[in-house]
Amino acid sequence: MTQSHKQPLYSEQDFESLFDAAPDAILLVNNKGQIERINAQAQHLFGYEPGELLDEPIELLIPQRFRNFHVDHRKAYADRPRVRGMGGSLELFARRKDGSEFPVDVNLSPIHVRGQTIFAAAVRDVTESRRAARDLSAANEQLLAEKHFSDSLISTQQGIVLVLDTEGRITLVNPYFEELTGYTADQVIGLDWFSAFIPQDEQQTIRDFFAVVMQEGLNRGYKNVIVTKHGGHRLVQWHSKTIEGTDGTFVGLLNTGYDVTDQEAAAQALREARDDADHATAIKTRFLAAASHDLRQPLQSISLYLAVLSRALSDSKALDITAKLRQSLDSMGEILDALLDISKLDSGSVVADQHNFPLQDMLDQIAAHIAPHAENSGIALRIEPTRYAVRSDPVLLQRIVENFVGNALRYTEAGKVSIVCRKESESVRIEVSDTGVGIPPEALETIFEEYFQLENPVRNRNKGLGLGLAIVRHLARLLDHQLDVQSVPGQGSTFSVTLPLVASTEESAASGELSAAKPGASQVAKVLIVDDDPAIIDATRILLEVEGFEVQAALDGDEALAQIEGGLRPNVLISDYRLPGLNGVEVARRIRSLAGENVPTILVTGDTSSREIVDAGLKNCTILHKPVDSERLISLINESCRATTAADTSN
């Protein structure tokens, strides 16, 4: 049988399936702009149910603001139908059933069916692609901006920027590098950094360092010298960081640096100047220490001989002369002390050692030192007991307060001088008040300056040199203590120093494990003198023998120890602190050890500060400063003998 027509390859149902399976949303629109058919993707894209869009104008799927324009555009297209692909220059937007808008690309194709033309519109949502395009554009703009910024930064950087590749070849330099080295960028790009810019004797070391860096990485600073075009050397402070590629391997080294040649030269000059100053200070300190000792030695022997002479004389005129000699000698000693003190403070050789201690201990020492002078002057000295503990340097603080007291006695003809400790919140104020001449208001600002004195136009040495309060000011600054002065002319003055208050501690009286040697009721006290100055030994021996003491002497520690080993058991030891070989503290300790007795010790020093002796912590020891007051020395020897006798009786 013959078949007149071929069987269709695809049925209408097949076409329906193909239509719905298309990846894009497809709408069929007639020449009146009405929707005749849509596929499943179009229903999903626009949010309509099947059948809702049939016979509706295509403008229903276009935002309201574009609809009038679209009608004219659609009619013009119908008059001249043609295929128009996606991705044109127009930005198109569609509208869903819920009113939301989204960007689209539209492909238009005219189709001729049964004598009429219908139009197939393939619609694709390009929201994500548009967003990606915007992001890409923004990223490109950011990259361009960053490149512009980095180029500007490198070119304007007030320091070196240098990039090396993995072989140490130069790949980038900035204008600062060009200015520093004398080369242009074109002249150095591609050059081996080490051979071109590193001094020959350092090239291998720097090259080896670079090889390690490119293996292990680096992000730190260092210094090295580079050679300029004209052969000059510049010291550069570098900071280098390895550059990593996308795969994590090192692809180069970024180096930033600054020329520190001039700064290093200035720093070296400063170091040398500081070393010279330290050396000069050390020499000055040694000189002051030697001067402090050597200048006081003759004063000490003169003072002792004068004391012996006073005891040997009976004529009133002769005694008056010796009293005046004593007064002049005391003034000389005070002046020498002040000059050496201010020199040491100016040189910075005085160092504070601050710690907690009870104030009463210091007040007791001040009373022992000052009371005899106050009594001789006819001035009542009143020291109010205290239980406060403070933080300071006890030696330097004592010098401040003793300066206050000495000043008060000097300018008080009659009446009293008092020391009172007052608590103020977390501080203690030590006040020294007098009933003296007072200070005019206009002088209160300058009272602590060097060489300033009240009512002493002819420089009466009995009123000092005008350095006492200047020394106080230096010491207060060193200790960070506050000074103050209040005064009423004709009524008196109050000088004060304020320092930190600390919790009180119970200080138990130190008792040595050894007992002190004591003279019997009918025995003469034995005194051992250790001093390297024969004149001082001679004068002290004569003085003490006149007072009835038995005296033995030694020129150094070894000679003194030999006498102890030979059986000598002194009741009191008087020793110079600075001796050849062993110092006075060491001699005292060894004598106590050999004798098995806690021998009371009087240490005599020519230093204005007794810091070293105090730090040694020798118990049952009194410190005297040269020139020693002979009455004070004899009184101490008697007190030591009485104290040991009383201690033995109580036991």
Image: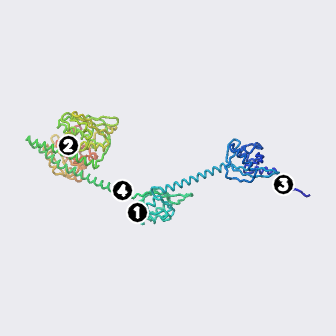
93 and 556: which is toward the camera: 93
Earlier-in-chain disc, 4 versus 2:
4
**What is the distance, in whole Å, between disc 2 and disc 1 at their CAs?**
61 Å
Across and down, in percent, residue 525 comes to: 17, 43
Across and down, in percent, residue 229 comes to: 43, 65
Residue 209 image label: none
Residue 233 image label: 1
The residue labelled by disc 2 is: 464
Amino acid type of the residue that numbered disc 4 sits on in the rendered structure = Ala
Left or right: where does residue 419 sit relative to residue 266?
A: left
Earlier-in-chain disc, 3 versus 2:
3
The residue labelled by disc 3 is: 8
Amino acid type of the residue that numbered disc 2 sits on in the rendered structure = Gly
Earlier-in-chain disc, 1 versus 3:
3
Across and down, in percent, residue 76 comes to: 74, 49
Earlier-in-chain disc, 3 versus 4:
3
Earlier-in-chain disc, 1 versus 4:
1
**What is the distance, in whole Å, between disc 1 and disc 3 at their CAs?**
94 Å
* Picture quadrant of residue 629: top left
